[in-house]
Image: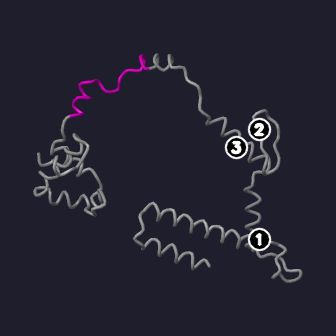
Amino acid sequence: MKNHLYQCIYDILLSDIQEPAKLTSLQRYKAKIVRLRARRMEVMMDNNAQDKMENEEPSFHILKTVKRRETRAICQILDMQGNNVFGHLNVLNNFLAHLRRKYQPIEIDQTCVSRLEEVIPLTCPTKYADLLEQPIITKELLSALRSAAKHKTAGIDGFSLKFYIANWDTITQHLFELMNQMFLHKNTHQQNMAS
């Protein structure tokens, strides 16, 4: 069964299914493999298994796994009031309640936020903000290319940064126009680049 499930995963990876559907299918088969392994481990760890011989002692590995599981289990904690909490389910519910209290939305006073904004200085004065809105220049583009990892691909086209640097003289103008089109106009449509 395990080999069959792994074969299904391999077939999904090689298929032409769209990525979101492929991910959903992969997660479903991964869950099946995890459940299968958990069931197998449960049977292995069961001291009353039918295939066990009379007076047979569990193997060293099973004893070690059981001991590790027991030492890792949290059996008792102190709650927020200092009371001892016992039992797996009670401990779990206590942790859940603690995390809900800790990460619940909190009320904020809008006047405090306004006062805070007045006190905190701007990190970027407007003269620098205006410079950041200027079009990209070729020197900045080449500097960005040289600072990145040479054998990493920048996108799905498969071209590494080493390719862009090696062919810089040939592609400078096209890359420069493309980057500024994306930066200034937020699109890459051909009709906008031609104008």
Residue 39: give x, y in percent of width and height. Answer: 71, 70
Write the start and end of the magenta stretch as one range. 117-133
Mark with earlier residue (2, 3): 2
Question: Going 11% across and 51% down the picture, which residue do you hit?
Answer: 173
Local crowd size for mark 1, using a 10 Å CA cut-off: few (<14), some (14–19), many (≥20): some
Q: Amino acid at mark 2?
A: Asp
Residue at the disc numbered 1 = 45
Tell me the mark number nearer the camera, choosing from 2 and 3: 3
Residue at the disc numbered 2 = 79
Q: Amino acid at mark 1?
A: Met
What is the secondary structure assignment of the residue under circle 2? loop
Mark with earlier residue (3, 1): 1
Residue at the disc numbered 3 = 96
Find the distance from the CA under tag 1 to the CA under tag 2.
32 Å
Q: Quadrant of residue 153?
A: bottom left
Mark with earlier residue (1, 2): 1
